[in-house]
């Protein structure tokens, strides 16, 4: 793997895809608990799959503006290592979730222009990690996972006081440029390793991880 690049493969829903991600060296795998997404997984299915993930690979719960009842249901049943907040959760809610569940919290921030970068600073004060993702267009059905990249030069040379991941339309062809422009050391992706929305393809996962190794 290039330098010590850490990759999160998100939206995993079956054992073959998880095996492919783990075998190829993914540091994180993500379960999407968001019913509007084609990658949504039930709490029961996630619990079964999570039990087979080896120690050392972090299991992340992706949620969108979750209430405590949903988080209780997920975290009471699925052994998870991190919560990814991918909605419009305010910094105070991020801090509240972190305190209530005692797990590291990663807050996604959508970027479309320079003004969006200000938000990153306020979330970096309360979250353990920041996910710098493409801001979804107003008519998008999903708040993330749309396979769209943003202008990476917006964050060239930017650094924050907490670890961060780059996301948004990453694929085997553009990942070297994404890393060169942004300096990212952690990457998160979903769409580019699917054969259809919500269907992960082990060969595409292997191809992405090979591209990262070649950087
Ligand atoms: O993947 C989803 O369905 C999803 C739903 C709601 C919020 C976020 C979602 N995905 C996250 O978006 C990034 C970028 O995805 P892509 O590579 O552009 O498809 C993904 O890694 C997830 O963390």
Image (cartoon, rainbow, N blue to C red):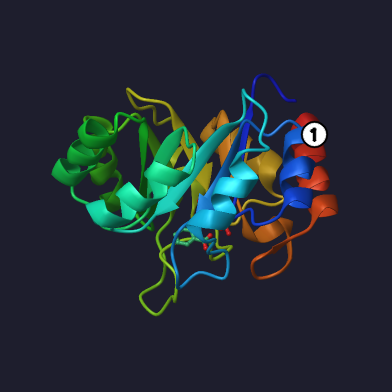
Which corner quadrant of the image does residue 93 belong to?
Answer: top left
Label 1 crowd (10 A; few <14 / some 14-19 / many >=20): few
Which corner quadrant of the image does residue 24 belong to?
Answer: top right
Position of 123 compared to 63: left or right? left
Task: Give the quarter of the figure containing the C terminus.
Answer: top right
The kind of secondary structure element at disc 1 is: helix
Residue 130 seen from this side: yes
* Residue closest to the far top: 3
Residue annotated with mark 1: 23
Front in this rendered view, residue 138 or 106: 106
Front in this rendered view, residue 54 or 91: 54
Question: Number of numbered discs present?
Answer: 1
Task: Give the quarter of the figure containing the N terminus.
Answer: top right
Position of 169 compared to 204: left or right? left
The residue shown at (45%, 45%) is 77
Front in this rendered view, residue 177 or 54: 54
* Residue closest to the far left: 92
Q: Is residue 65 above or below residue 129?
A: below
Under 8 Å from ligand 1: the CB of mark 1? no
Front in this rendered view, residue 6 or 171: 6
Q: Position of residue 156 (x, y in %)?
A: 47, 36
The residue shown at (62%, 24%) is 55
* Residue closest to the far bottom: 139
Q: Position of residue 205 (x, y in %)?
A: 77, 48
* Residue closest to the far right: 203
The residue shown at (25%, 38%) is 123
Q: Is residue 112 above or below residue 158?
A: below
Which corner quadrant of the image does residue 141 belong to?
Answer: bottom left
Q: Position of residue 192 (x, y in %)?
A: 69, 58
Q: Is residue 38 above or below residue 21?
A: below
Residue 122 seen from this side: no
The residue shown at (53%, 55%) is 44
């Amino acid at each position: 793997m290039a330098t010590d690049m850490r990759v999160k493969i998100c939206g995993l829903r079956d054992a073959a895809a998880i095996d492919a991600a783990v075998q190829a060296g993914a540091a994180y795998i993500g379960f999407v608990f968001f019913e509007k997404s084609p990658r949504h997984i039930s709490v029961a299915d996630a619990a079964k799959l999570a039990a087979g993930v080896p120690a050392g690979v972090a299991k992340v719960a992706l949620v969108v503006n979750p209430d405590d009842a949903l988080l209780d249901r997920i975290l009471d049943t699925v052994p998870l290592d991190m919560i990814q907040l991918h909605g419009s959760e305010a910094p105070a809610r991020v801090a509240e979730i972190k305190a209530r569940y005692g797990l590291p919290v990663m807050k996604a921030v959508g970027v479309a222009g320079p003004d969006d970068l200000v938000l990153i600073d306020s979330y970096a004060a309360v979250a353990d990690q920041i996910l710098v993702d493409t801001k979804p267009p107003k008519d998008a059905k999903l708040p993330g996972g749309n396979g769209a990249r943003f202008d990476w030069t917006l964050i060239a040379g930017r650094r924050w006081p907490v670890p961060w991941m780059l996301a948004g339309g990453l694929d085997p062809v553009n990942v070297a440029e994404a890393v060169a422009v942004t300096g990212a050391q952690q990457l998160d992706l979903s769409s580019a390793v699917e054969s259809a929305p919500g269907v992960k393809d082990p060969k595409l996962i292997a191809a992405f991880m090979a591209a990262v190794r070649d950087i």
